[in-house]
Amino acid sequence: MRIARYRIVAALRDRGQQFRADWVERELPERVDPAKHVGLLATLRLDPADLADVPSP
């Protein structure tokens, strides 16, 4: 499972965390591996299950 970076950025901007969103845009790849970035997602208080791309049928 991968998470699109724009979903993380959007979640942070919705919370008013503009500086964190800007940092994520600069530092993370386009497709984020939640297993590799589990610590960062926890620090940002983001649940990977809420951000995961919906699989196509």
Image (cartoon, helix red, strand yellow):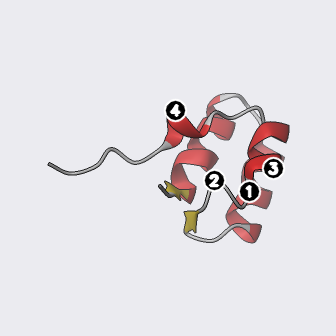
Q: Residues within 10 Å of mark 1 (few under 14, many from 20)?
A: few
Which residue is nearer to you in this view: 30 or 47?
47
- SS for callout 1: loop
Please tell me whether mark 4 or mark 2 is closer to you in this view. Answer: 2
Q: Residue furthest front?
A: 35
Q: Which residue is mark 1?
A: 37
Q: Which residue is mark 2?
A: 34
Name the kind of residue labelled 2 in the image.
Answer: Pro
- SS for callout 3: helix
User: Are dots 1 and 2 in contact, CB under 8 Å?
Assistant: yes
User: Are dots 3 and 1 in contact, CB under 8 Å?
Assistant: yes
User: Are dots 4 and 2 in contact, CB under 8 Å?
Assistant: no
Q: Residue at x 76, y 69 (%)?
A: 27
Please tell me whether mark 2 or mark 3 is closer to you in this view. Answer: 2
- SS for callout 4: helix
Q: Residues within 10 Å of mark 4 (few under 14, many from 20)?
A: few
Rounded to the nearest angstrom, the CA distance separating label 3 from label 4 is 15 Å
Q: Which residue is mark 4?
A: 50
Q: Residues within 10 Å of mark 3 (few under 14, many from 20)?
A: few
Give residue 34's position: percent from left, percent from top.
63, 53
| First in residue order: circle 3 vs circle 4 | 3
Which residue is nearer to you in this view: 18 or 31?
31
